């Protein structure tokens, strides 16, 4: 028995030593004071697994989470992107986030080009994710899924980027809370026991203006020459704290996360904290403790300075104390931002308007994607694109997929060239429809959600940009990373529309009223129809007989009363 | 390649070893339970059927029981938690990501590691009946399945708004007592339970278990037919009632129970006398073969798990182990190929030019894949 056990251990250790060489894990935290009122904290956990994608065995991983590996293998997944977000990222004042995410839940996946039935796999994927992340992904089905042609190109290396293998869906109603964070933390090698993940306390995370949890899985180059592939998993948590909620502008780990950091994750090959010092010029602050290093980064015409901390295996708490001088912040909005709203009144016709601001001095190519639910039938002929209130713009490319009630959403993808320094309004009209009685949710009067529009662009400069370049999986990789363009995917607000909602107590009221009316009408009608009025003859008995009857009656009554009194006694 | 060939044999070998090893290492108490036909595992189905903020107390109820069963040892994988609305992260909650059972905020019943299996619109009568009878759609994840067997003790806890003979789900549909009884009968016929403890906290709760006819069910309801179940107290910070009386006292009792304690179900059935509950707690024992006074609370709220701690651990020196070299060779033999990232957005000027060509018929070639070395 002993020998067998030793052998077992031996084999086990053997396989895990392989894995040690194959998986690498890094944990990073970026803290960036945003314009005036908020501070942005972004956790970036990246696991890279040098696995041959042709090797179909994803079970023997070391740091890579096994449930994700199993899903890739079973459902033939090439790329997977999930985000669960509460709140809205304010592009105009906050700039661009590291990872874009729409309010609610969003999911898009690329399947491998040898997948037989993409739709079946997509359904199975959403089901298994609903179990894995405790979110209602099982509501993702054909009725809210589209395959956009331009907006969601693969982020990693793929053999074919034919959009028949792409599926995208969003659930704008989804609420994000602790139950989503718990399974998320379990995907990390150190879970929440140590390292940066130990800072993720639900009470503090959900007391923010914006919180987003995301998972991005793709294939990347394993080597410089890119002759080998690796599987990469980026897990990230983005938080925007409001100074008004915190009560002060001076932030520290205790104020942001509830406690300090108790050492790094021992399984991580690199653990860093970066603090963006760019806002120091407008409002100076001092960091405690002193950073280990200061990094200068020039990227796409933007100069930035970052304080860098290497997380030691012992306690660390970083804090910033602001100088008392006045805050002369001027908000410079990013080159591209957008918003979305509803137009019209009443419950018959309405419209969706997307406003896109181009603050850049040159024209910009953008793609607008609208995934509109089937219960909001839009009319393509009403699509109007007007720039600066007078200039009508023709879309370069227009892709439209008509929806089908209960089966398919309306899909609209517009490629546009935005004029320099312009405000472009894209509007489309829709009808309000009646749903079937049982299709209304229990809280039908709350309204129905229309997901956010997605505006993608490849910006020529990296102003206000914090995103990662395509070839990097860490924040470190984004320093001095000047590239041809910088991808942004702006998500606009969700919209809530009130569909004509019937009064659900109406049938009950109608039944009650109808029954009352019937009952009231029935009595007299029944009497009238069934009874006959007959003239009664007047009693003409003789006086003596009448007197006799009266006497008998009186006598009998008295006798009865007497017997009753006897009983009572 | 040798390594790969060897693997199936190895894994089979390992399975045999591990089976032998586990059998030998099973907890003797567990083995005894199996032999004597006692329960061998514990499951809990905890359901809150009410939506809307003013039903905060029902969420607090169900989370109180969730907290207790988790603390007493039932793992999250064996708890099916159904919550019809989100209270913890509701914008009206002044303390995000918390749900308290008490205005003094003694116990955050939501906790830091809650896992909700069915939430929001997923909480429907159909899903509930499918869950307990095991008639789920293919592809349902494990965490949404009740994988019980003939050795399972199942705790079913329901809370919400009810009436004589029904329990409302989300204010839009209801389950009747007959449907509930039939679902449990189906569970019994499919050997999906050993014993069931059915607990319900609603108005006229006793009406829900009156029609049960399957064996081995112990049922308790917070009120008799014709009675209302009452809530405990208001938290002014939240503005609504925070918990129901029956569950409040049940949690108070369960907080005193530890996984090793010998407190009996008989005691648990008496946690809320009429003086504190105001409603009369109804109990149905006729389907249950054992005497509740001899049944430990942990038979339903705790968990039996076949676990044995290893006393000896053999340490190996990793550096002594030789690594097989076949795998590396196999990789080396492959022809080298350069891979490229796809450009994240197509080049639209090029795309428009191509489309025009296609339209005018000058170039009818297939639309090209825009693959290049892009960052």
Image (cartoon, rainbow, N blue to C red):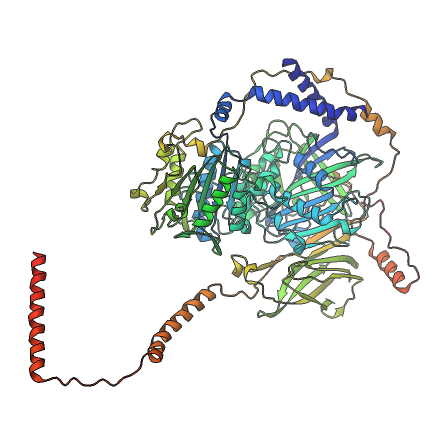
Q: Percent from the top left, x then y, of residue B223?
A: 35, 46
- Asked whether residue A259 appears in the rendered view, the answer is yes
Residue A156 lies, with reference to residue B171, above or below; the image says above
Extreme residue in the right direction: B362
- Quadrant housing the N terminus of chain A: top right
**Depth order, front residue of B297/B15:** B15
Judge from the rendering whether residue A544 lies leftward or rightward of residue A426; answer left or right: left
Locate residue B270, reporting x and y percent.
33, 37
Dividing the image into 4 quarters, which one contains the C terminus of chain A?
Answer: bottom left
Residue A223 % position (x, y): 81, 34
Count of marks, rendered view: 0
Q: Nearer the viewer, residue A104 or A164?
A: A164
Taking the spot 87% from the left edge, 59% from the top edge, the residue there is B353
In this rendering, would A251 be left or right of A421? left
Q: Quadrant of residue A399?
A: bottom right
- Which image quadrant is residue A70 in? top right
Provide residue B291's location: percent of width, then percent of height. Answer: 36, 32
At 40% across and 45% down in the image, what residue appears? B209
The answer to whether one can see residue A65 in this image is: no
In percent of the image, x 41 and y 27: which residue is there?
B261
A206 lies left or right of A483:
left
């Amino acid at each position: 028995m002993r020998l067998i056990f030793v052998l077992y251990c031996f084999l086990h250790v053997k396989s895990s030593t392989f894995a040690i060489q194959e998986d690498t894990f890094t944990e990073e935290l970026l803290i960036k004071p945003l314009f005036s009122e908020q501070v942005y904290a972004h956790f970036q956990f990246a696991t890279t697994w040098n696995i041959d994608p042709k090797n179909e065995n994803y079970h023997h991983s070391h740091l890579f989470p096994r449930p994700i590996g199993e899903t890739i293998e079973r459902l033939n997944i090439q790329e997977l992107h999930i985000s669960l977000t509460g709140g809205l990222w304010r592009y105009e004042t906050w700039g661009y986030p590291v990872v874009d995410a729409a309010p609610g839940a969003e999911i898009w996946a690329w399947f491998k080009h040898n997948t037989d039935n993409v739709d079946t796999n997509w359904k199975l994927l959403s089901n298994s994710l609903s179990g894995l992340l405790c979110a209602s992904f099982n509501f993702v089905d054909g009725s809210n899924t589209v395959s956009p042609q331009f907006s969601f190109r693969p982020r990693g290396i793929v053999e074919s980027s034919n959009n028949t293998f792409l599926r995208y869906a969003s659930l704008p109603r989804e609420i994000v809370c602790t139950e989503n964070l718990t399974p998320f933390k379990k995907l990390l090698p150190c879970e929440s026991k140590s390292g940066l993940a130990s800072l993720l306390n639900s009470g503090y995370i959900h007391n923010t203006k914006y919180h987003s949890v995301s998972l991005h899985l793709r294939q990347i180059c394993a080597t410089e020459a890119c002759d080998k592939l690796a599987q990469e998993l980026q897990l990230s948590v983005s938080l925007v704290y409001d100074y008004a909620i915190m009560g002060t502008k001076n932030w520290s780990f205790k104020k942001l996360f509830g406690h300090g950091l108790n050492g790094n994750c021992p399984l991580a090959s690199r653990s860093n904290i970066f603090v963006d010092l760019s806002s120091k010029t407008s409002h100076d602050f001092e960091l405690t403790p002193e950073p280990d290093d200061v990094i200068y980064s020039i990227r796409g015409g933007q100069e930035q300075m970052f304080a860098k901390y290497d997380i030691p295996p012992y306690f660390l708490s970083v804090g910033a104390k602001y100088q008392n001088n006045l805050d002369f912040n001027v908000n410079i909005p990013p080159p591209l931002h957008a918003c979305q709203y509803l137009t019209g009144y009443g419950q018959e016709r309405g419209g969706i308007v997307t406003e896109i601001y181009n603050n850049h001095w040159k024209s910009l190519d953008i793609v607008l994607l609208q995934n509109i639910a089937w219960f909001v039938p839009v009319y393509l002929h009403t699509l109007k694109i007007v720039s600066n209130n007078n200039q009508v713009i023709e879309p370069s490319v227009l892709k439209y997929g008509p929806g089908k009630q209960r089966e398919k959403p309306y899909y609209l993808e517009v490629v546009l060239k935005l004029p320099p320094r312009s405000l472009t309004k894209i509007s489309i009209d829709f009808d309000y429809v009646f749903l079937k009685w049982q299709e209304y949710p229990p809280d039908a009067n709350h309204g129905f959600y229309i997901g956010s529009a997605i505006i993608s662009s490849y910006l020529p400069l990296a102003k206000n940009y914090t995103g990662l370049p395509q070839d990097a999986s860490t924040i470190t990789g984004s320093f001095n990373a000047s590239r041809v363009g910088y991808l942004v995917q702006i998500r606009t607000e969700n919209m809530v529309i009130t569909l004509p909602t019937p009064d659900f107590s109406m049938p009950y009221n109608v039944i009650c009223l109808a029954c009352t009316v019937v009952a009231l009408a029935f009595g007299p009608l029944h009497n009238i129809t069934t009874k006959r009025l007959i003239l009664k003859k007047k009693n003409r008995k003789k006086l003596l007989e009448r007197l006799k009857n009266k006497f008998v009656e009186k006598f009998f009554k008295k006798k009865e009363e007497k017997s009753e009194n006897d009983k009572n006694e | 390649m040798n390594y790969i060939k060897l693997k199936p044999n190895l894994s089979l070998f390992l399975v045999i070893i591990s089976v032998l090893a586990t059998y030998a290492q099973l907890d003797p108490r567990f083995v005894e339970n199996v032999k004597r036909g006692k329960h061998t595992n514990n499951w809990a189905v905890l359901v809150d059927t009410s939506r809307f903020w003013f039903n905060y107390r029902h969420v607090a109820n169900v989370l109180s029981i969730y907290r207790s069963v988790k603390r007493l040892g039932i793992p999250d994988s064996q708890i099916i938690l159904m919550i019809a609305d989100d209270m913890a992260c509701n914008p009206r909650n002044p303390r995000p990501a918390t749900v308290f059972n008490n205005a003094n905020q003694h116990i955050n019943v939501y906790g830091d590691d809650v896992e909700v299996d069915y939430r929001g619109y997923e909480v429907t009568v159909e899903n509930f009946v499918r869950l307990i009878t095991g008639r789920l759609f293919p592809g349902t994840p494990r965490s949404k399945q009740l994988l019980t067997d003939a050795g399972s003790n199942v705790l079913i806890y329901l809370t919400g708004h009810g009436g004589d003979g029904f329990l409302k789900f989300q204010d839009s549909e209801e389950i009747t007592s007959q449907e509930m009884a039939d679902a449990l009968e189906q569970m019994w016929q499919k050997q999906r339970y050993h014993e069931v403890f059915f607990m319900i906290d609603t108005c006229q709760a006793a009406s829900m278990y009156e029609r049960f006819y399957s064996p081995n069910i112990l049922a308790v309801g917070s009120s008799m037919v014709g009675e209302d179940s009452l809530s405990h107290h208001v938290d002014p910070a939240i503005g609504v009632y925070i918990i129901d009386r029956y569950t409040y006292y049940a949690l108070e009792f369960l907080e005193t129970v530890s996984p090793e304690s010998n407190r009996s179900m008989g005691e648990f059935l008496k946690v809320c006398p009429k003086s504190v509950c105001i409603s009369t707690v109804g109990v149905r024992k006729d389907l249950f073969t054992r005497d509740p006074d001899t049944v430990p609370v942990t038979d339903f709220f705790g968990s039996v798990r076949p676990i044995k701690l290893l006393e000896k651990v053999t340490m190996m020196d990793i550096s002594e182990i030789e690594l097989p070299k076949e795998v590396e060779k196999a990789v080396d033999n492959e022809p080298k190929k350069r891979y490229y990232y796809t450009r994240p957005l197509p080049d639209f000027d090029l795309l428009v030019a191509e489309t025009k060509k296609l339209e005018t018929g000058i170039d009818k070639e297939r639309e090209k894949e825009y693959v290049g070395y892009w960052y």
